[in-house]
Amino acid sequence: MSAVATRSHADLGKLIMIPSAAVMLTLDLIALGHGSRGGAAGALKWLATGLVCAFYLLIIWCYVRRGRATASSRSLTAHVAAVAATMMPFAFPLLRAAPPGVGIQLASDALLVAGTTWSVWALRSLGENLSVLAQARGLADRGPYRWVRHPLYTGELVSALGLAIAAGTLAAAIAWVVLCLLQGYRAVKEEQVLLRALPGYPSYRSRTAALLPGLF
């Protein structure tokens, strides 16, 4: 059962996530600097990579600014789900059977651009409240959080769908479904902490959707 506890130790999230995001940002900046195919497909690919760079830059910014959590879940399953959901998108390129065709690649890049754009907006609005694990710091109700409680998860799922389409395998499709389940479970566990720790969260929860406006 999930429980809430005040953190009293060092912020391991900063120690892990800032260097990790810096490495990923460096790799994507290198990819951004290399030439890609021309035309609309090349521009879309370049835009997607640029947005991913912005995403990792924002992760670093959020973690540098954030303070201590006021509460954190003690649920081991919640922690495992959070870490697994964070790492799973990196597995999709490994599940690819063959290079996708032009149409499939365009659809994949379009989803990646749409999902990452939404994620960047959500991340900018979340700010210092960002955490991989289920923790409470403050109530985010700006940007997409005005309508949706977990817009960052929504954006990540859309981006991951693009990666799964590019992979084009049954294994990738199953992995995407598993990712959806992990993010849903993660959201439930996160809300258990927020409901207990933030007095304004029950009211906020009653007027917003979980992942999509008007749904769930």
Image (cartoon, rainbow, N blue to C red):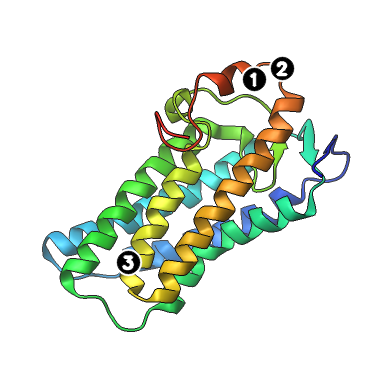
Horizontally, residue 206 falls left or right of residue 66, namely left
Q: Residues within 10 Å of mark 1 (few under 14, many from 20)?
A: few
Q: Residues within 10 Å of mark 2 (few under 14, many from 20)?
A: few
Question: Is residue 62 depicted above or below 12 in this figure?
Answer: above
- The residue pinned by badge 3 equals 165
What residue appears at the point 63 percent right and 34 percent down from the top-left corner? 129
Residue placed most toward the observer, 51 or 142: 142
**Amino acid under label 2?**
Pro
Residue placed most toward the observer, 212 or 8: 212
- The residue pinned by badge 1 equals 202
Question: Is residue 91 depicted above or below 46 in this figure?
Answer: below
For the residue labelled by badge 1, is the local secondary structure a helix, a strand or a loop? helix
Q: Residue furthest left?
A: 39
Q: Are marks 2 and 1 in contact (CB under 8 Å)?
A: yes
Disc 1 from disc 3: Cα separation: 37 Å
Question: x, y percentage for residue 29?
Answer: 40, 61
**Amino acid under label 1?**
Pro
Per the rendering, the mark at residue 147 is none
Disc 2 from disc 1: Cα separation: 7 Å
Looking at the image, how many numbered discs can be counted on the residues? 3
Which sits earlier in the primary sequence, circle 1 or circle 3? 3
Question: x, y percentage for residue 199?
Answer: 71, 17
Question: Is residue 184 depicted above or below 42 in this figure?
Answer: above
- The residue pinned by badge 2 equals 199
